[in-house]
Image: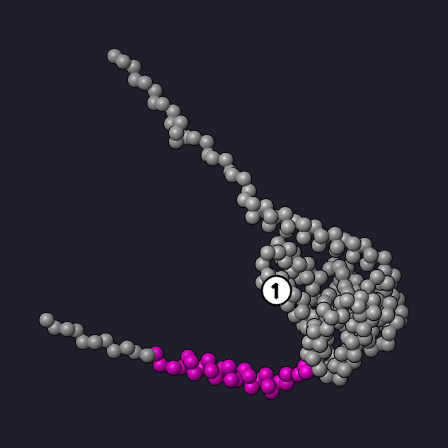
Amino acid sequence: AVAPQAPAAPQASLAAAPEAGPMPTLTRVWLAVALLLLLLLGLAYARGLRNFRRARPLQSPFIRAWLKQNALRRPLEVRLCARIDSPMTYGVLRPVILLPESVGKADTQALLCALDHELSHIRHFDAVWKPLIAAAACLHWFNPLVWAMAILAGRDIELCCDARVLRRGGREKRRAYASALLRMEEARAHVLPLTNAFSRNALEERIGAIMNAKKISVSALLLTLLIVAAALTAFAAAPESVTATPPPIRK
């Protein structure tokens, strides 16, 4: 009797999986440009953070009173920085409001407008949203719609801050707030004259929104809610349309 042969190893079925092919050229280009943009963004942020930390604290009686009146759960500090030409903020857990020397020496009303605007950025964590928007633009550098989104998001953030400041200050604060914006833009134009043309439209839009802002009254809000409720009730009470079924055909 012939001994049964052992079954041959299924070499064909157990063949090694094919190795992953080389990265496509388009993927390499996307990755290289995205990493380069992210690197430049990180270097710019690190350079700015190093310069900002050299700013000197502003400890005037007006600033101390303002900090006490607008205390946050996070420690807040106000500093003067000679390397900037417009107010800005940095930091999340320990936020800092940076003021240029021109604003720090300006009248009390302009200083108060600048502080209230930057405080609105801090309260709504705009220091987190702006880097995320910039990182999204770096990753989607090939998509013009993402760059448009980044530009419009920055504009909307500033307009929202203006609206919140005016909501807290009331209608009488509009003219002073708009004048403070104009003075800051003039100081920026003296330092960087080429930036004036690029920011003029945004500044005009902000000032127009400030001067045309209208406070919604309680009666107008209630009227709007009543109209919406009446419309929803009418749609809910409308009878469903019944389609008549044709009679069966007798053969």
Residue 15, image x and y in percent?
43, 30
Of the 4 image quadrants, the one containing the N terminus is top left
Q: Nearer the viewer, residue 243 or 182?
A: 182
Q: Is residue 223 magenta?
A: yes
The residue carrying pointer 1 sits among few (fewer than 14), some (14 to 19) or many (20 or more) residues within 10 Å by Cα, namely some
In percent of the image, x 67 and y 53: which residue is there? 37
Mark 1 = which residue? 149
Q: Quadrant of residue 145?
A: bottom right
Q: Is residue 162 above or below residue 21?
A: below
Q: Is residue 4 left or right of residue 210?
A: left
Of the 4 image quadrants, the one containing the C terminus is bottom left
Question: Considering the numbered disc 1 on the image, is that residue within a helix, a strand or a loop?
Answer: helix
What range of the chain is rendered magenta?
212-240
Q: Amino acid at mark 1?
A: Met
In percent of the image, x 89 and y 69: which residue is there? 60
Residue 174, image x and y in percent?
74, 81
Q: Quadrant of residue 223?
A: bottom right
Q: Quadrant of residue 56?
A: bottom right
The number of numbered badges drawn on the structure is 1
